[in-house]
Image (cartoon, rainbow, N blue to C red):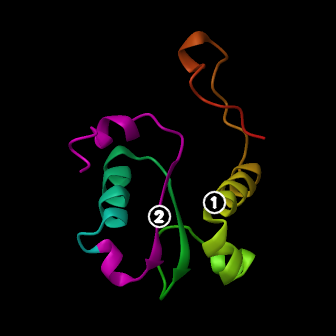
Amino acid sequence: MAESIDLARRIEGADLTVTGECFLDEYSFEGGAVGGVVELCEEAGVPVLTVVVEASGDHAVPVIELAERFGPERALAATVECVEEAVAEHLAGLERPRWPVSSACSRRPPVA
C-alpha cells in the first residue's frame, strides 16, 4: 500500500507524520502499517506521532491513547473528532518551527 501511494516521497520533508490504528502492541511494529510508517519516518528523519484507541506495552515512538484521553466510548463513537483534538493539542505543545515565510513553505500549516 505504501508504494502505491508513494508514501516515502510524501513523508520526505514533512515536519511530522501522524499514523495510527485501533490497538497498538508489539506486533504493530512487525510488518504492520504503523511499523511501516515508523520505519519510513526514521529513514527520512521525520518525527512520527502514533494515535490509537488503545495501546499495550511500551513503545519507542510517541503514542496518544484516545481511550485513556477521552474515555473508551467517546474514542470509539467520535474517533475522528478525538484524533483531531489530540493532534491539535500535541501540535500546540511543540515549539513553533523556524522556517522562512515564502511560497515554498506555503504548504505547511501554521502551528497553533
Mark 2–mark 1 CB contact (< 8 Å): yes
Give the residue type that dot 2 points to. Answer: Gly
Q: Quadrant of residue 79?
A: bottom right
Q: Quadrant of the C terminus?
A: top right
**Disc 1: CA contacts within 10 A as few (<14), some (14-19) or many (>=20):** many
Could you say where residue 29 lies in the image, as x and y percent from the top left? 32, 73
Quick one: SS at disc 1?
helix
Which residue appears farthest toward the bottom when viewing the image? 57
Q: Residue at x 69, y 50 (%)?
A: 91
- Compare residues 83 and 48 and report the one nearer the observer: 83
* Sequence-wise first label, 2 or 1: 2
Quick one: SS at disc 2?
strand
Give the residue number, with chain letter if any, for mark 1.
83
Q: Is residue 41 magenta?
A: no
Q: Residue at x 71, y 32 (%)?
A: 110
Q: Residue at x 72, y 39 (%)?
A: 111
Vertical comparison of 49 with 108: above or below: below
Give the residue number, with chain letter if any, for mark 2.
20
Q: Is residue 11 magenta?
A: yes
In this image, 41 relative to 75: left or right?
Answer: left
Vertical comparison of 101 with 78: above or below: above
Q: Which residues are magenta?
A: 1-29
Find the distance from the CA under tag 2 to the CA under tag 1: 10 Å
Vertical comparison of 19 with 14: above or below: below
In this image, 33 relative to 91: left or right?
Answer: left
Could you say where residue 51 lies in the image, as x and y percent from the top left? 55, 65
Vertical comparison of 80 with 23: above or below: above
- Compare residues 90 and 86 and report the one nearer the observer: 86
Could you say where residue 73 lies in the image, as x and y percent from the top left? 68, 81
Give the residue type that dot 1 points to. Answer: Val
